Amino acid sequence: MSPELIIALKAAVLGVVEGLTEFLPVSSTGHLILASHLLDYGSPEFDVAIQLGAMLALTWAYRERLLQLLIDTATRPAARLFVLKILVAFLPAAVVGLTLHHFLETLFRPGIVATTLILGGLVILMIDGPRRFRGLADLELMTVQQALVIGLGQTVSMVPGVSRSGATIVTGLLVGLDRRAATDFSFLLALPTMYAATLYSMWKARAQLAGEMGLGMGVGLLAAYVSALIVINAFLRYVQTNSLRPFGWYRIVAGLAVLAWFFLR
């Protein structure tokens, strides 16, 4: 097998891992750290490329919603207020990300990922129980205060293994949204949050990106785009009638497996 094919296969696997996990409450960062370790492939620049692929998929999936929101902001005060709520929810992560960036980078270790996978799974099991009440379904009725709390919840996801979507969806449930509305707002909030993070990372690594753009990045970006597009649509359908508890159990099992592997190897 040629070296180029091996690189393409590894890049494709990591791209699929990114696409499958970015928008599920299981932590894409945690899975990428573990998968990169196992495959002995990847770099910060490669991670930027595949995250961009996932974000382009989300943008495409929400293209009609975003266009309608843009049109409505010109005529409907409620639409302008909703955009404000997204920006309010975005601000805490922006502040924490800029001020604690270097410290957060020191937490990217398998042991921390395994621990946060388990803890996050337990939180999901506690919050999204089988008898959960039906919450608010219309995001325009959500208050600015609720949006701010969701934004504060998003800051926790900067710890590797926590999951951005998991933190925002669970916080959305806590402030009274139903699963579909919480997931919908989580995805909308991902757009400014992740584009800002991705563009910031691209700017920091611009010299390396210029020299490393090649087969691996291209394959990884495409794999992340396709797999993320499939997951986004499937997950939005799933949460309409199903709880997040299977993802909670998955996180616990995955975290325990990682801990066992590192302690027993």
Image (cartoon, grey):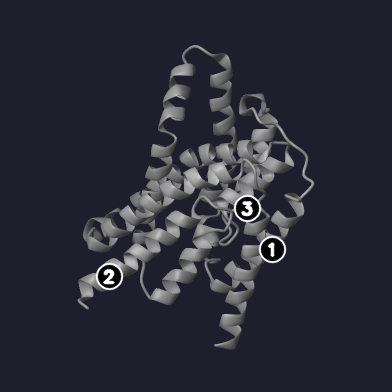
Of badges 3 and 1, the one in the foreground is 1
Q: Quadrant of the N terminus?
A: bottom left
Residue 179's label in the rendered image is: none
User: Label 2 sits on what residue type?
Assistant: Ile
Apparent side of residue 63 relative to residue 107 in the rendered image (left or right): left
Q: Is residue 185 above or below residue 155?
A: above
Residue occupied by mark 2: 7
Give how far across and how far down residue 253 sits, in percent: 64, 70
Q: How many marks?
A: 3
Which of marks 1 and 3 precedes in the sequence? 1
From mark 3 to mark 1, how far is it between C-alphas? 12 Å
Q: Residues within 10 Å of mark 2 (few under 14, many from 20)?
A: some
Residues 127 and 146: in front is 127
Tell me, yes or no, if residue 105 can be seen here.
Answer: no
User: Label 1 sits on what residue type?
Assistant: Leu
Q: Is residue 60 above or below residue 66?
A: below
Residue occupied by mark 3: 156
What residue is rendered at 39% in x and 44% in y? Answer: 57
**Residue 180, located in which quarter of the rendered image?**
top right
Tell me, yes or no, if residue 10 can be seen here.
Answer: yes
Q: Quadrant of the C terminus?
A: bottom right
Q: Circle 2 — which element? A: helix
Apparent side of residue 238 relative to residue 227 in the rendered image (left or right): right
Which of marks 3 and 2 precedes in the sequence? 2
Give how far across and how far down residue 79 sits, in percent: 54, 20
Residue occupied by mark 1: 119
**Residue 3, located in which quarter of the rendered image?**
bottom left
Q: Is residue 164 above or below residue 160?
A: above
What residue is rendered at 48% in x and 23% in y? Answer: 69
- Is there a contact, CB below 8 Å, between mark 2 and mark 1? no
Give how far across and how far down residue 56 sits, in percent: 37, 43
Of badges 2 and 3, the one in the foreground is 2
